[in-house]
Amino acid sequence: MTAGTAFGTALGTVIALDVGGTYIKGGTLRGDGAGLEHTERWYTRADRGPEAVLETVLACAAELAERHPRVAAAGIAVPGIVDEESGLSVLAENLGWRGVPVQDWLAEHLGLPVAFGHDVRAGGLAEARAGAGRGCADFLFVPVGTGIAAALFHRGRALTGAHGGAGELGHVVVRPGGDRCRCGARGCLETVASAAAIARRYSRATGWHGITAQDVRRRAEAGDAAAAAVWREAIEAMADGLAATITLHDPERVVVGGGLSRAGEAYLGPLRTALAARLTFQTVPDVVEARLGDRAGCTGAALLALDLLDRDLLDRPARRAPGEAVAP
């Protein structure tokens, strides 16, 4: 980027969408350094089928664009496996999308240039420029919520992998032969350490239903033995997954986001201890809470849109003064 602020240059306003399985988050971002503004949230209602979800995404984008008529570009971040170069949602199981050309359809619908990215990598980009990853060239951004994923940042850039699948930390097998994961494997990190898994495992152990991961944490702190065991197992499994990732990538920092990060030191403190116990020759990275909360993905999508405008500006031929000769 050509700018001197965390968010970009004075390139105009962009709209952004972060598409999730439960909510579609939207907002606007000005290129003058202001944070995300005019945020909106709509239900995804993925149970209606993939085409209905896409129609909702297009309608939400159009609604944002209509409210802000001076918009110069749009950005969108989606989950799953994405091909960022072609703008294709390769596979987003929770949306029912397979091979959906999201970028092209949104650009045609809005009549605007559109930047396209992966939701977790977009969130990591936002944390890198304006959050807990700022000033750190090599770090992991790990949102822990209904699922678990990671964005691996090396020298300030997110690694995508050869097929767009880099960072699927939630599908690292940490408990061989364990619970069946939605990916088809057994014992994936998500089956033990995600917020959904914590709630499910506690319900299975006690018969209690309608319990959230934060409820389990509070019960553990109040002396509930079953809750304490589930909470401890989740943290130990997360430490196992992170230890393997740290051994491979040697990050300076681990930025933990998602719903579980809101537990603060009740989660991060034991996680640091468990992680340090698993590392021997490796340098133990800082483990910190993400700063941008649930706005990270949407902010990242907006930053991608600003970057798109920035590249477009750089690619334009310079204006010549009247009578100025064209260089050979």
Image (cartoon, helix red, strand yellow):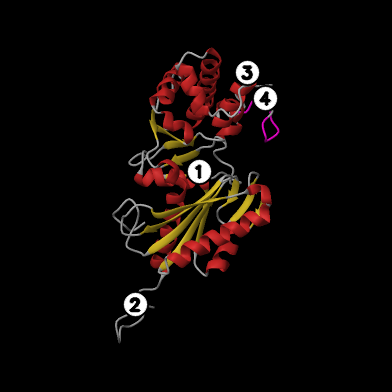
Which amino acid, by three-letter code, is at mark 4?
Asp
Distance between mark 1 and mark 4 Cα atoms: 25 Å
Classed neighbour count for the residue bearing mark 4: other residues with Cα under 10 Å, few (<14), some (14–19), many (≥20): some
Q: Circle 1 is placed at which residue position?
A: 120
Q: Position of residue 133 (x, y in %)?
A: 37, 39
Pointer 1 or 2: first along the chain: 1
Which amino acid, by three-letter code, is at mark 2?
Arg
Q: Are marks 1 and 3 in contact (CB under 8 Å)?
A: no
Q: Circle 2 is placed at which residue position?
A: 319
Q: Position of residue 305 (x, y in %)?
A: 45, 59
Which amino acid, by three-letter code, is at mark 1?
Val
Image quarter in which the N terminus is found: bottom left
Which amino acid, by three-letter code, is at mark 3?
Ala
Classed neighbour count for the residue bearing mark 2: other residues with Cα under 10 Å, few (<14), some (14–19), many (≥20): few
Distance between mark 1 and mark 2 Cα atoms: 39 Å
Pointer 4 or 3: first along the chain: 4
Q: Which residues are magenta?
A: 181-188
Q: Is residue 15 above or below residue 209?
A: below
Pointer 1 or 4: first along the chain: 1
